Amino acid sequence: MATRALPMLSFVAGNYRNFNARATRDALYAYWDHVRAGGRMYWAVAGAMSSAQLGISLAPAIRAGLIHGLSVTGANLEESLFRLVAHKSYKDFPEYRYFTKRDDTKILRQRMRRVTDTSIPEDEAFRAVEKILVPMWERATKNGERRFWHEYFYELVLSIPRSKHEGPAGDCWLLAAAKANLPMVVPGHEDSTFGNIFASHVKLGECNASIVKSGIEYMARLYDDYRALSRGKGIGFFQIGGGIAGDFPICVVPSIKYDLQAKVKPWAYFCQISDSTTSYGSYSGATPNEKITWDKLTERTPMFVIESDATIVAPMMLRALLECRANPKAADTIIRDSRKETARFRA
């Protein structure tokens, strides 16, 4: 019965025994342990995960209360919106590995912007959203308003009528996050298409740069968000990829401790999915132990590194966690039995 009710969790328990599979299984179990006990989880999302349609599994997880805060790149933020309003106009290029420069020039002339094996339509995505977002910036300039980058997108996505949705609303993680008013930071939002568009309107004197709160203000806000989210059982950190989306929010713990000189709970869990290899000076490929030396994690923090493709691993983990949320008692039984089996082989 448990297997039929929780097919993904049962599959992981039965098949994921060693190597990256084992790391995936153990990270999944520890994630469930944490939220089952009342803990919270903060996600850091780098890469082009919105274009890869992670929202199909991420949005339900937000609605189910499995994700409690987000740090995302500006590209992931806007591309979740693009998938909602322009999904039918996307084009896929599964043979991209064999493209020539001439092939990609043809794609450019089609007004498509390729992201690996898919592409964002210039007119139906960028330009359509621009017509809504730029007037919002102009009104904010006129009224002297100041907001965080994601707050403009929260307002925008909530205002789009269902008749204008091309992609399923249930698959839009930005819409799910906006409805939940999820705490969010978008570090380095200038490095995105709409960051560039905003800069152009500032340069032309049509918008005031001050209407968007700065990255420093994001960190100041994160101090308060972290303190609230870490109450009780604490908050864990789940990271896809590397770079600023991960490094910015994880620094909040040592900053509260050393810069504010205040008490702070350490991160209660850490997992990173990355296909970056460990190398000299690479943040994406750094092992979690390195973060201990920066006081971001402690030796008691449950730590997991899954060296794999996040487009494969993250949806599987989220599906299993959704099964756990829907059937907690059955999930606990499967995980307990799996751990007992594993314990037999421990040295």
Image (tube, rainbow, N blue to C red):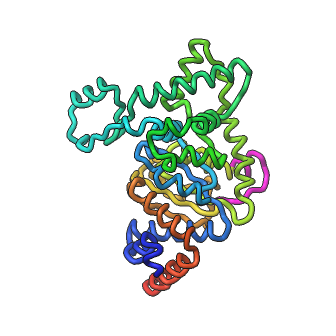
Q: Quadrant of residue 102?
A: top left
Q: Is residue 63 magenta?
A: no
Residue 262: in magenta span: yes
Residue 313 x/y as whole percent: 42, 59
296 and 154: which one is in front? Answer: 154
Residue positioned most to the front: 163
Residue 152 vertical position relative to residue 227 in the rendered view, above or below: above
Q: Point out residue 256 in the picture as x, y percentages from the top left corner.
A: 73, 49
- Residue 145 percent coordinates (x, y): 72, 26
Which residue is at a point 47% across and 75% down the rendered structure image?
5
* Residue farthest toward the bottom in the current orientation of the protein: 344
Report the quarter where the C terminus lies. Answer: bottom left
Q: Which residue is located at x 22 percent, y 31 percent?
A: 103
**Left or right relative to 147: residue 312:** left
Q: Position of residue 170 (x, y in %)?
A: 51, 50
Horizontal side, residue 43 vs residue 309: left or right: right
Range of residues picked out in magenta: 255-267
Residue at (57% x, 38% y) in the render: 157
Using the image as rendered, state which of residue 207 and residue 300 is in the foreground: 207
Q: Residue at 38%, 38% (x, y): give it.
A: 88
Left or right: residue 55 versus residue 213 is left
In the image, 88 versus 182, the foreground residue is 88
* Residue furthest out toward the right: 262
